[in-house]
Image (cartoon, rainbow, N blue to C red):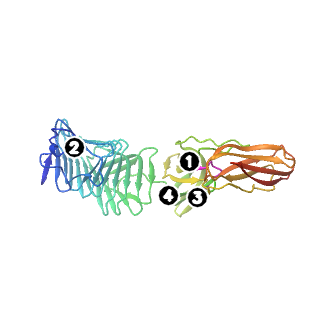
Amino acid sequence: MFGQYTQWDGSTSTSWRDSSNWNAGIPNSTKSVRVSVTDFDPYVPVPLGSDTARTLDLEIQQGGALYFDSLGVLVVHGSKLDIQGGNPGGTIYLGYGTLISRGNITFFNAGIFDAGAGTLEFAGGTWENKAGSTFDPGTSTVIFNGSGDQDFIIVDTTATITFYNLEVNTQGTVTLSGNVTVTNSISVAAGCTLSVGPGDTLSFAEGCTISGEGTISGGGSFPELPVQMTSFTATANRLDAILQWATATEVDNFGFEVERRTVQSSMFQVQGSTTTLNLEPGTWNKIGFILGAGTSTSPKEYSYVDVNLPAGRYAYRIKQIDFGGAATYYDAAEVEVGLAPKELSLGPNYPNPFNPTTTIEFTLPEAGKASLKVFNVIGQQVATLFDQNAEAGRLYRATFSASSLPSGLYFYRLEFANRSIVKRMTLVK
């Protein structure tokens, strides 16, 4: 039962902070709240400084509804969160809000929880999804981040509860009881164990991303991950991205597809005599494949180098494929390539001597129009490699192809803001 509580009257507005809407004062970390049918349903507000909406316990009675303002936050400090059933049952609409449980809580859901795109964060306790209740996951994230062992889900054994994103950050064991499906992503952090109880199930929808260095185990039913990934990193080397990943064990592993998408692409792209690299921002694109080790119980290391990218920020992810064609996605890593000092510089071409192509790099001290041109020994222009605006602090790379030119000495000149740098190169056929 509740101890001290305040009932939502809702006689004036939807404002949580308006004391006239409560019969015994605004709820806080030691005062519980009840919400039932009223003229105005309460809205959990966006925090103002340290003024975050708080309550000890939370009870949504039959016909009552609790809404969250966009980015609203409610912290529950007690041991009870009760959404009562009935016709209509109690309802929580999370929207883009956040509901945080600080204590060892029991979440009794016999009504409706519409999670929207919000976040539910639990420090510990039990989630009892009662028969006849509804939990609509939307695109929300459910997080368990306590410091010890926890119960996780206790549901009607005939029902399945579905999460969109699930994160387990508890340094200990989180025990799952019931039937759970994760549709978009699941992450079990290092040092954490998600234990599936005997007779219970954990399922992943097709395309669900699985990440983290923790453990999924137990006597219940859950997918055996074909690959236990232990690390995945992306680092920059000038205009190249170096990807490295490692596995602890592999089962029936055909290999890894490497996928890339732009996060923040360069404003300008270098055009030489070769085709400009075209990327569609925000779309994952397959860029390579690395063979796996089949079945292995020893650690394996892999790498892939994505070369000659336009300067910008990129995300990479690994798609692991087994011999039967089933696939699992792993965490994405981001890297920014092409960062350079804000100075006017023209690098030596490489290789030099060359036949028939060579590469030239340059940087600018500030944004503006730049040109990079090639001349023969009598001063005739034979190629324009770059002639457009460019950014400061970015590395630009151009390719010079001399397949139609005779052997000999050539000069290349960078011009920017009434300044120029000239260097020479040798074509040998």
Nearer mark to the viewer, of 1 and 2: 1
Q: Dot 3, crowdedness within 10 Å: few (<14), some or many (≥20)? A: some
How far across and how far down the image is residue 277, in percent? 64, 43
The reply to whether callout 3 and callout 2 are in contact (CB within 8 Å) is no
The residue singled out by tag 3 in the image is 302
Who comes first in sequence, dot 4 or dot 2? 2
Who comes first in sequence, dot 3 or dot 4? 4
Q: Is residue 308 magenta?
A: yes
The reply to whether callout 1 and callout 2 are in contact (CB within 8 Å) is no
Q: CA distance from mark 3 to mark 4?
A: 11 Å
Q: CA distance from mark 1 to mark 2?
A: 42 Å
Q: Which residue shows up at 20% across the image and 38% down it?
A: 13
Question: Is label 2 in a helix, a strand or a loop?
Answer: loop
The residue singled out by tag 4 in the image is 229
Question: Is label 4 in a helix, a strand or a loop?
Answer: strand
* Badge 1 amino acid: Glu
Q: Nearer the viewer, residue 349 or 34?
A: 349
Q: Dot 4, crowdedness within 10 Å: few (<14), some or many (≥20)? A: many
Residue 289 vs 133, above or below: the answer is: below
How far across and how far down the image is residue 9, in percent? 14, 41
Q: Look at the image and give the residue range highlighted in magenta.
A: 303-313
The residue singled out by tag 2 in the image is 110
Residue 124 vs 274, above or below: the answer is: below
How far across and how far down the image is residue 35, in percent? 17, 43
The residue singled out by tag 1 in the image is 259
